[in-house]
Structures are given as structure tokens and as C-alpha cells.
Image: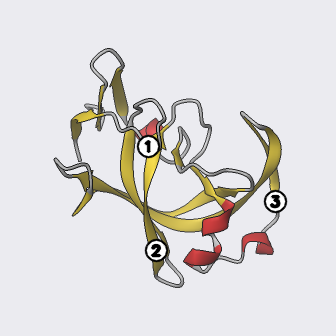
Amino acid sequence: MPIKDYAFTSVAGSPPRPMLWARVINPDKNLGIVALALVDTGADECAFPARVASKLGHQLKSVPAKQIKTAKGKTNAYPHTSRVEILETLPNGMYGSKVLHTMAHTPIDFVEGCEAFLLGVGNFLNKFVVTIDYPRQRFSIRKPKK
């Protein structure tokens, strides 16, 4: 780890935001995808779009749904055990092969109606000291000193 002074990323005309490359893997099927994920201090949990569950070999509705509140209102989330690897961001903005942090065998919410990959407080941000510098459009994440 550390993620030091990473530049914000702008996707599809959205304002620049703190984002990291994440590889999401179903540990039972060893199927994975890589996506840009938003570092979201307002998200209680890590949440990914429901549509990617099948690409990972998860049967979305094979687990009980939990109702959650989002910016768009109430919706269903289906927690499935996944492995999430945070990958380095290269100078050209693409992801590299170096794994900066791994969340192994972690329940991740696959959310109906969600199109973003969100790295929320539960299972991710609560393990780190996060510094977000909006004027400079940069952020850092590091393990706390013991």
C-alpha cells in the first residue's frame, strides 16, 4: 500500500473524483473483472452494480436481499463473498499489475439500479487514514500508525 497523492479521475464527463482501480473476483469460480471504483466516504459499505454479479459467476438472488437507501431511493442489495484487489494506477491513468491492498473473502453488496463501483466505509475505508484534497484534486490512503 500506500496510495500517496493520487490524482482525481474524471469519467464520462463527470467531475473529477477520488477513484481507484479494483479487481473484483468470485473466489469460488475465480472469475473477475477490473473497474474504476469511487472512494466514497458517504457509502456505508462497498457496493457494486448488480449486473456484474453474473459475470463473476454469482447467482445474484441466491442470497436474501437487504433493502438499502441510496441517492436514488430504496433498492435491493445482495451480499456475495468476493475478493477485491486494489490495483496501482499507472501514470497514464490505467491500472497496473501491482496489488496495493486485498480484501479477501469479503461480503460485497451487489446493488440493483447501481451503475457505480463504490469503495465504502465498511470493509474498506474504515481500515485506513484517508486524506482528500479537493482544491488540488488529489488523495492519499495509508494504514494508521500503531
Could you tell me which secondary element the residue under label 1 belongs to?
loop
Q: Residues within 10 Å of mark 1 (few under 14, many from 20)?
A: few
Question: Crowding near pointer 3: few (<14 within 10 Å), some, many (20+)?
Answer: some
- Which residue sits furthest top? 135
Find residue 15 and report its horizontal and vertical position in percent.
Answer: 45, 29
- Earlier-in-chain disc, 3 versus 1: 1
Q: Residue furthest front?
A: 13
User: Split into 4 quadrants, where in the image is the C terminus?
Assistant: top left
Alpha carbons under labels 3 and 2: distance apart: 22 Å
Left or right relative to 5: residue 141: right
The residue where tag 1 is placed is: 11
Q: Residue visible at 64% across and 76% down?
A: 54
Q: Amino acid at mark 2?
A: Gly
- Dots 3, 2 in contact, CB < 8 A: no
Q: Residue furthest bottom?
A: 29
Q: Residue 121 in the image: x percent, y percent?
A: 53, 38
Q: Secondary structure at mark 2?
A: strand
Q: Identify the residue at image location x=60%, y=60%.
A: 107
Q: Is residue 12 left or right of residue 81?
A: left
Q: Local crowd at mark 2 within 10 Å, few (<14), some, or many (≥20)?
A: some
Q: Element type at marker 3?
A: loop
- Whole-angstrom CA distance, mark 3 to mark 1, is 30 Å
- Name which residue lies at 51% across and 48% down: 123
Residue 65: mark in rendering: 3
Which of discs 3 and 2 lies nearer the camera? The answer is 2
Tag 2–tag 1 contact (CB < 8 Å): no
Where residue 49 sits, quadrant-wise, is bottom right
Give the residue number, with chain letter if any, for mark 2.
32
